[in-house]
Image (cartoon, coloured by chain):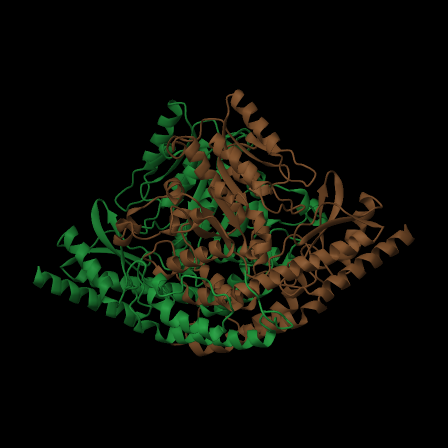
Chain colours: A brown, B green
Amino acid sequence: MNDPGPIPPAGFHMTPDEFRRAGRAAVDWIADYYERIESYPVLSRVQPGEIRAGLPSEPPLHGEPFEAILADLQQRILPGITHWQSPNFFAFFPANASGPAVLGDLLSSGLGVQGMLWLTSPACTELESLVLDWLAEMLGLPAAFKSSGPGGGVIQDAASSAALTALLVARERATGWESNEQGLAAPLTAYASTQAHSSIEKAVRIAGLGRRNLRLIDVDDTLALRPDALSRQIQADRLAGLHPCFVSATIGTTSSNAIDPIRQIGQICRAEGLWFHVDAAMSGTAALCPEFRYLHDGLELADSYCFNPHKWMFTNFDCDCFYVADRAALIRTLTILPEYLRNRATESGAVIDYRDWHVPLGRRFRSLKLWCVIRHYGVEGLQHHVRQHVALARQFTQWIQADDRFELAAPAPLNLVCFRHRAGDDFNRTLLDRINQSGALFLSHAVLRDRFTLRFCVGQTHSELRHVEQAWHRIRQIALDLEKSG
Amino acid sequence: MNDPGPIPPAGFHMTPDEFRRAGRAAVDWIADYYERIESYPVLSRVQPGEIRAGLPSEPPLHGEPFEAILADLQQRILPGITHWQSPNFFAFFPANASGPAVLGDLLSSGLGVQGMLWLTSPACTELESLVLDWLAEMLGLPAAFKSSGPGGGVIQDAASSAALTALLVARERATGWESNEQGLAAPLTAYASTQAHSSIEKAVRIAGLGRRNLRLIDVDDTLALRPDALSRQIQADRLAGLHPCFVSATIGTTSSNAIDPIRQIGQICRAEGLWFHVDAAMSGTAALCPEFRYLHDGLELADSYCFNPHKWMFTNFDCDCFYVADRAALIRTLTILPEYLRNRATESGAVIDYRDWHVPLGRRFRSLKLWCVIRHYGVEGLQHHVRQHVALARQFTQWIQADDRFELAAPAPLNLVCFRHRAGDDFNRTLLDRINQSGALFLSHAVLRDRFTLRFCVGQTHSELRHVEQAWHRIRQIALDLEKSG
């Protein structure tokens, strides 16, 4: 294609010294970014295509210095960033990160190991088992989820993948372990509340059950799943000749942070022989604090459980912790051992090979960042910051309640506040647009009982009282302006 | 649980200055590691449980300084590392990394954005589309795979996930888009060679087709899929009332780097109306060089394609580039738009929302590391190093051919050499154990036509002539010792 010209003796690779210099520049760029982050509009203001239009349409033939890349990151990429690490980010659920997590992940990138087998880096497997056992202890999870018993934990990329994995085991168990071999034939049904995350439907579709075999069960006044309605639906399905196999309950729904009654649902699943998955992606982290551990009441009845340190536990994406009470069932569902992966350690049965615990084969050393986070903060540090976020959300809740123009749209048990202006859906839609266009903060929305609702979630690492105060003042001011102009 | 004691005013978070210091220490740790990496045994020598036993069984109550974590990484974790970044790592397929990739990933961690929607960080989506279009150009992929046409590319975690995604679209298309809705009912069949990666079987099981509906097609003398055998099997299945839907071909099989005849298989798929997926996870990277672009001959007949920059293109895991010729089919298969993700940009249809292109919802800014790699090396730099690896493998092949005691076990078209000692399977098994126990290098194995075979793959970033020379001398010496002792 072209004459490469004279090649340097060591080729085009960074030398260790160049890596030190460029690495220092990258670390400083991030530190500078965090120092300036409040000066950027939280929600990016670019138009579709704008970022791409500012970049060369063709790949470079010749290499460029790292400084040039950093300069382009600042000038050409940053305007297209919505600042998830801003303390004024209150939208969706957070993806909070922290220094020790970012650096733990850096060390993982540097080591660059694959953890598909114990053999391919024993420490990658053993630290993961250990740290997930630590977390089981820290969250007060049932003993069955620890690797010392019949179960154990594994890091997945996201709660979506955890839900899919759980559903696959449920499917296999319900078909006498025959779907894997024969293909899916029996009409299996799965259950979750109307408020469950879209990943449950996605999993049901991927696993071949079909969306119409996912039953979305009615909720009560707190938007939590109604066990009586679940029982009735299961009975109706059995009478219709269908085969119920899987129930997913949520601790902290995406729309409103509703908490399904785990114990009652678990009892139904036990009685009916259904796989019981508990999705605590967002709110599981709260159980770090003993006063919130009631969230997990009844969890000993669950077959699987997940929570996401990459949402609220200061650990950058991706890091979903997925636990099963019976690892043999999980492994039986997903195991494949081609010849090129055979080795003595695997055949001895004395080791975990995490490749059999999820969809992909390859896996990075993700426990390293979790280990760094837990050691940096200590249990007390993590508890402190979770409590702070909940306290800030409660403060915000009180301000809402004290202002006649606003109302709460749902209970706010933890760090998510769903609220609305009393002036109706159109007003609230416009209010949300104006708030986000201001650049001062970023909220998102939900529709609860057919009404448009603003969501205010306090979970960003650096959100403090002043940010929540500023947010409330800004929301009130924009609402006031709107009331006048309307 | 405990009295947290006095809390520092800013809580337990790292300040930007602490991050600068700890970040510099982490960067230096990695640079030091690379400088010393050849002094470690490539394959970890620890026993099962040994790493875990050296670490505290309980999580720390109080936080610890970052230096303490780094010291433990060095003393307690490193002995449990199998050194994938060592230039003496010749096992499996590589997971090669590079300075610009590691630092690009660090910047992604620092920005900490979620790219599930265009809105949630426009640059995350637009840079990904751009860089995947660059790569389509760099690899000479068909125009249909570019985002300017009806198709486009997306980064997935692994080729396993790419294969699953492709199979799901195939399943939906073959069932008139009804499996998602009604559940899987028709007996669908899928096809790959006996040499295909285990991820194809895993995908077939996950998607509910059933393992017995995956046909493993016979191979020719080069271990490549036989199109005539594929045709016959498809006809036989149709006669039996089954519904063929999906064929996966491989460019560079895991066992021996065999290259399936893409054009012939593609013609069969077109004639039969089957989805044609091409898995070039390992060897796609070779097409960076015009002289290896023959590998992709016929690729315009494929519906989907993937290759892994995290194997051979100096980009740390995870980074699988997955392309489809018809993105509408992909999106139709996986899309879900819950209310809490609705936004004007999505509804305008003017943007890509990558959440609909794979299983998980959340996604990190993975294109940043690819962008850093391509800009650091330039096209010429990447070509240079790929050519070097192939040249080194050819050198090794010549040494094998020149030594009467050894033989090639399969053609070595690129950077994987499959060879064996002529003394039989038991000898070769012992030889491999001794080689790996030496610590000087790490090889893995395959079984080709029922015979135990050693695999020597040259793809680690820093592997140079001297490493391959040392490896050959060591292999010969160990074989000589074994011959004598036997």
Locate residue B325, reporting x and y percent.
53, 44
Question: Residue A475 sits in which quadrant?
Answer: bottom right
Examine the rendering and report whether any part of residue A207 can be seen.
no
Q: Is residue B72 above or below residue A341?
A: below
Quarter in which the C terminus of chain B is drawn: bottom left
Left or right of residue A410: residue B458 = left
Q: Residue at x 40, y 25 (%)?
A: B238
Nearer to the camera, A15 or B379: A15
Nearer to the camera, B411 or B204: B204
Left or right of residue A431: residue B159 = left
Locate residue B244, reporting x and y percent.
42, 31
Quarter in which the N terminus of chain B is drawn: bottom right
Nearer to the camera, A132 or B479: A132
Locate residue A398, reporting x and y percent.
76, 55
Left or right of residue B285: residue B467 = left
Q: In this view, does A356 lie above or below A14?
A: above
Q: Which residue is drawn at 63% across and 64% down?
A: A77
Q: In this view, does B247 lie above or below B422?
A: above
Examine the rendering and report whether any part of residue B294 can be seen.
yes
Q: Residue at x 74, y 54 (%)?
A: A397
